[in-house]
Image: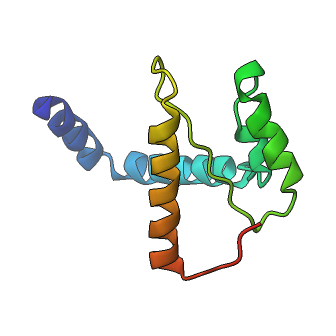
Amino acid sequence: MTNFFLRIYDFLAKRRWLAVSLAVVLSALFAFLASRVRYEEDIAKFLPNGGDHRKSQEVYQQFAAQSRIVVVFSPAAGDSLDTEAAEEAMQRFGEIRVQLMGDIQLE
């Protein structure tokens, strides 16, 4: 693998005009591709679709403001829901949130 890159270097070192031309063309190509990137600000489009996730989508749609954060607690794939463990995890999450952020009003 090292020899491959050394051969490319040797080839381009002998042909400076080709190296500069290649750098200019690649820079123009990457600049063009970067200009076509579009950002999607609606995170609802990133949420999974399907029956299992319908409730999460409904909750997010109820919180239409973008300044809100929704935390969904669910079991790992293939595991059954242990309600006591889930409640304990939510309580612990709430305690840590209060420690880090203070007592911010939750809705």
Identify the residue at the far front of this view: 84
- Viewport quadrant of the N terminus: top left
Residue 58 image offset from top left, x and y in percent: 84, 40
Residue 46 image offset from top left, x and y in percent: 71, 39
Residue 40 in view here: yes
Looking at the rendering, which quadrant does residue 50 occupy? top right
Q: Residue at position x 79%, y 63% from top?
A: 66
Residue 103 image offset from top left, x and y in percent: 59, 81
Residue 32 image offset from top left, x and y in percent: 68, 50
Q: Nearer the viewer, residue 25 or 93?
A: 93
Direction from residue 10 to residue 103 in the image, left or right: right
Q: Residue at position x 46%, y 28% from top?
A: 76
Q: Nearer the viewer, residue 35 or 2?
A: 35
Q: Nearer the viewer, residue 36 or 11?
A: 36
Direction from residue 15 to residue 104 in the image, left or right: right
Would you place residue 75 above or below residue 98 in this image? above
Q: Residue at position x 70%, y 22% from top?
A: 52
